[in-house]
Amino acid sequence: MDRFLADHSVDLARPVHWSPGQGAATGFDSDTETRAFGWSFDKSLTYDLFVDFKTSTGSRFSALADPGQNERTVYLEARHLGGS
């Protein structure tokens, strides 16, 4: 995950710290979207949120990562799909 985000110019040292239910204007806080994808978030955890990064093809994504140390679950939300 770190390499993927770094390859897309995401500053890994500066995530937004997000907890479920706090709101972030992303699909990660939408009950409809989280149910549709089968996502569930632990309300007692704080996640790393990287908002609106851009791929080389112009796609824009937000990424949410759990606070795991050895293995992390990453959730990606496409905000805009660019050309290929």
Image (cartoon, rainbow, N blue to C red):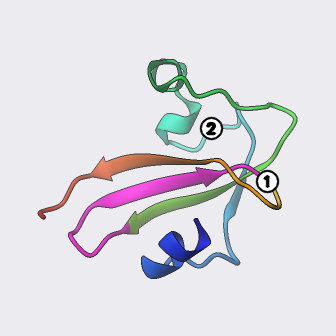
The residue that label 2 is drawn on is 23
Q: Residue at x 58, y 44 (%)?
A: 24
Task: Report if residue 59 lies within the magenta region.
Answer: yes
Which of these two is toward me, 23 or 2? 2
Q: Residue furthest left?
A: 83
Instruction: Determine the secondary structure under disc 1.
Output: loop
Query: How far, Cα to Cα, is label 1 from label 2?
Result: 18 Å
Which quadrant of the structure image shows residue 59? bottom left
Q: Residue at x 45, y 80 (%)?
A: 7
Location of residue 40 with respect to 13 vertically, above or below: above
Which quadrant of the structure image shows residue 23? top right
Q: Position of residue 65 (x, y in %)?
A: 65, 53
Q: Quadrant of the N terminus?
A: bottom right
Q: Residues within 10 Å of mark 1 (few under 14, many from 20)?
A: some
Three-letter code for the amino acid on which mark 1 is drawn? Pro
Judge left or right: residue 56 versus residue 66: left
Q: Mark 1–mark 2 contact, CB under 8 Å?
A: no
Q: Residue at x 79, y 53 (%)?
A: 67
Three-letter code for the amino acid on which mark 2 is drawn? Gly
Q: Position of residue 26 (x, y in %)?
A: 49, 42
Judge left or right: residue 69 versus residue 27: right
The residue that label 1 is drawn on is 67
Q: Residues within 10 Å of mark 2 (few under 14, many from 20)?
A: few
Q: Residue at x 70, y 53 (%)?
A: 72
